[in-house]
Image: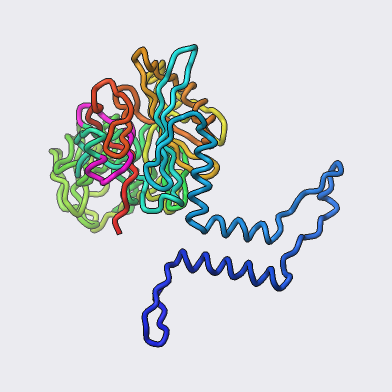
Amino acid sequence: MDTLIERKEFIVPIRTCEFLFTVSLFTVLTLSGVIFQPATLAGDLIADNSVKVPTLIDVTSNIIQDLDPQIRKEKFDNRISAKYKGAYISNVADGVKHIRMTKYYAGKPVRLNIVEVNSKVAQDYEVKPAIASDTLPHKRTVRAIAQNTNSIVAINGGFFKPQTGVPLGTLMIDQKIYTGPIYDRVAMGIFEDGYDVGRVQLNASISGNGHSIKIDNINQPRMLSSYILAYTRDWGSVAPASPQYGVQLQVVGNKIVKASANPLSIPENGYVIVGPKSQLSKLFGAKTVDISISTNPKWTNVKHIISGGPYLVRDGEVFVDMTAQKLQAIGGRNPRTAIGYTKDNDLILITADGREGSSIGLTLVELANLMKSLGCVNAINLDGGGSTVMYVKGQIVNRPSQPGGIALSNALVIAKLSY
């Protein structure tokens, strides 16, 4: 905010203004005797225990503490120290802590690396997904992805097709959908002021000539010949092959500029629709076509989405829906990666090493119970096994089976904001 006083420029940071306003309000109300205790209603008396209603002093004090960056930092630091007593805790950045600990299951060790983040304290950093390269069919190590995104922390992300590196499941970065969901698997939405978790479905269609045709997915491998898929330049320069009796439509702006049974180039400022000719021929000759894309749940103002599965914690309770999300193959005791968030809106990232004598790994139920014990109200499993890697300030801090970790499709990073 710029304020002119006697033709001299005086700049007051917005956060400072908020804090000074709140302190001034508190002082004025206190001196004027406005602070009051609301009367207790008759219905508030149960078994001789009166319900304590917060005074304006309490409310104002809480607001002051919430706005003061130093108080927020101290509260977070104290919360982490009390929560992880006996563990090794290091400060990665203000509002970002790295915790090393070992837990025992049936008398055998599991080596854990945990990063806990408070976004209100770590205001110079952003939690977001990152892909291995400019287009989807690529793979790099977590270290390479972290260094490429100027990140202080990174973990491996969602599932991906090993042969190509294309993410399998919903991936949104900076409000841009890179890939759509598969099997309605659970994903985490990342917002400016918090997080949410849900099983994501795609609501997409292309319309023209009076017809509206469902789009089954975006930038994903074909599962059924009847599916209609949209491919953007994030997929690459050329769309994949058409299904039998299929056709491809090259769309620029809102016009179909080419149709062919053969793979078409994907335009920089458009996309290619691929599917059965029996459906897409309804759009032939259309003067214009319109594409509509949204997700269910409708996460308004969501910035990023990363997909995983299964659920681990849902609404504060252990909930592992491995069969429903078609993830039976990842059962058993393995290296694990998970993310979740607490009632205080702290984000928790965790890796558990496995498949070795010094760390035997976790089952999904053990992982779910661990995330709940750490205070997660919602948590999801990410890709694991040989993919499990955690990077903190230039170092791989866990012990993946392959030194440095295997090449991956995507990661979840804590990156330095560029102003």
**Position of residue 381 measured from the top left corner of the image (x, y, whole percent):** 41, 30
The answer to whether 250 appears left or right of 152 in the picture is left
Seen at 46% across and 45% down, the residue is 195
**Position of residue 55 measured from the top left corner of the image (x, y, whole percent):** 71, 58
**Relative to residue 105, is residue 191 depicted above or below?**
below
Seen at 51% across and 35% down, the residue is 376
**Position of residue 44 measured from the top left corner of the image (x, y, whole percent):** 81, 50
**Relative to residue 15, is residue 292 depicted above or below?**
above
Seen at 56% across and 34% down, the residue is 316
Q: Quadrant of the N terminus?
A: bottom left
Q: Quick one: 198 or 290, which is closer to the camera?
A: 198
Q: Quick one: 291 or 124, which is closer to the camera?
A: 124
Quarter of the rendering containing residue 339: top left
Seen at 40% across and 22% down, the residue is 111
Q: Is residue 317 highlighted in magenta?
A: no
For this orientation, the residue located farthest to the bottom is 6
Q: Which residues are magenta?
A: 146-164
Can the viewer see residue 193? yes
The answer to whether 250 appears left or right of 82 in the picture is left
Colouring scheme applied when the structure was drawn: rainbow
**Relative to residue 284, is residue 4 depicted above or below?**
below
Count of marks placed on residues: 0
Q: Is residue 154 highlighted in magenta?
A: yes
Can the viewer see residue 277? no
Q: Quadrant of the C terminus?
A: bottom left
**Position of residue 105 measured from the top left corner of the image (x, y, whole percent):** 48, 16
Q: Quick one: 261 or 406, which is closer to the camera?
A: 406
The answer to whether 11 appears left or right of 43 in the picture is left
